[in-house]
């Protein structure tokens, strides 16, 4: 209960309605005049947030998350790039201890609209403007208080990271310091209600509500993710 109370306290301000216009929340798939769905990102796309989430914190580790980024990019028609998920980990089975900022290369990166979101240094100094955070098909994800538990409102994105892109930890209920277990859902291999992850917001608003650092989830299972407007999205970057 002490751990849950600490997570709830830190989530109280950041979770919930960001005040943003719900906007385009269709998961990134557009519809043409004939009612057919299309997905035509800029061919130079090297950054996106996944249109659909994993529905738990078990991504198959960093390798599984990277593979998902590559699969979604390929499905959107983008090939010939090496994709990695923006995730930190303490002891990943393949990569060991790693910070998200060190996984993604130097940039700059382009979103599905062909707009630059910045270099590695720029996105960790000034962030990524919410208008530039698009899915692989060019959609935007905005929280809506009218439908808070839906996938379209799931503006939380797994990162396990601080605002600087380094490994984040849970708050220690005994000290109030961020020196507890890694906030990475067991290094992205757990769907346990007893673990948590740090997430960012696609529609971030303030300095304490960033694209890669906003609050913890209340568990790594679907019910816990839903309580903080999450469904297991990740950010994907092409590092070459």
Image: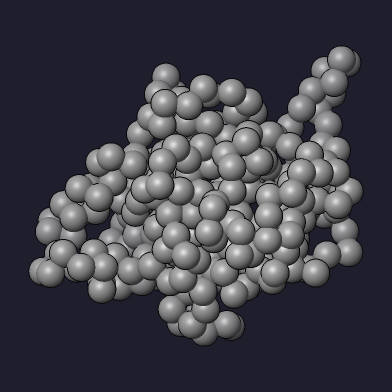
Up/down of 138 relative to 192, above or below: above
Question: As rendered, which of 25 and 175 lies closer to the eye?
Answer: 175
Q: Is residue 15 left or right of residue 105?
A: left
Q: Is residue 69 placed above or below 186 in the rendered structure?
A: above
User: Residue 92, percent across and down?
Assistant: 51, 79
Residue 33 appears at what percent x and percent y?
87, 15
Q: Position of residue 164 (x, y in %)?
A: 47, 65
Q: Residue at the location (88% across, 64% down)? A: 80
Q: Is residue 8 left or right of residue 126?
A: left
Q: Nearer the viewer, residue 100 or 54?
A: 100
Q: Could you say which quadrant of the image residue 101 lies in?
A: bottom right
Q: Is residue 53 visible?
A: yes
**The N terminus - image quarter:** bottom left
Quadrant of the snapshot with the C terminus: bottom right
Q: In the depicted view, which residue is nearer to us: 203 or 72?
A: 203
Q: Residue at left 35%, top 34%?
A: 16
Residue at the image point whose x is 62% and y is 36% from the top: 131
7 horizontally vs 66: left or right? left
Query: What's the colour scheme?
Result: one colour
Q: Is residue 85 visible?
A: no
């Amino acid at each position: 209960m002490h751990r849950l109370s600490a997570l709830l306290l830190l989530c109280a301000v950041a979770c919930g309605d960001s005040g943003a216009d719900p906007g385009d929340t269709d998961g990134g798939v557009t519809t043409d005049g004939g009612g057919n769905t299309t997905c035509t990102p800029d061919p130079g796309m090297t950054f996106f947030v996944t249109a659909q989430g994993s529905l738990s914190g078990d991504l198959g580790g960093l390798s599984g998350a990277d593979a998902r980024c590559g699969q979604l990019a390929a499905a959107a028609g983008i090939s010939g790039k090496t994709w990695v998920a923006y995730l930190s980990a303490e002891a990943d089975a393949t990569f060991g201890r790693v910070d998200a900022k060190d996984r993604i290369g130097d940039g700059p990166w382009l979103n599905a609209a062909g707009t630059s979101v910045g270099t590695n240094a720029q996105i960790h100094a000034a962030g990524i403007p919410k208008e530039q955070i698009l899915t692989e098909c060019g959609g935007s994800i905005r929280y809506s208080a009218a439908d808070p538990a839906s996938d379209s409102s799931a503006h939380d994105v797994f990162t396990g990271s601080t605002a600087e892109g380094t490994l984040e930890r849970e708050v220690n209920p005994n000290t109030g310091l961020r020196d507890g277990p890694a906030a990475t859902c067991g290094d992205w291999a757990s769907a346990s209600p007893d673990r948590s992850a740090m997430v960012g917001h696609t529609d971030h608003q303030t300095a304490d509500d960033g694209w890669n650092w906003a609050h913890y989830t209340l568990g790594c299972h679907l019910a816990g993710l839903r309580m903080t407007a999450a469904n297991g999205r990740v950010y994907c970057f092409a590092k070459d």
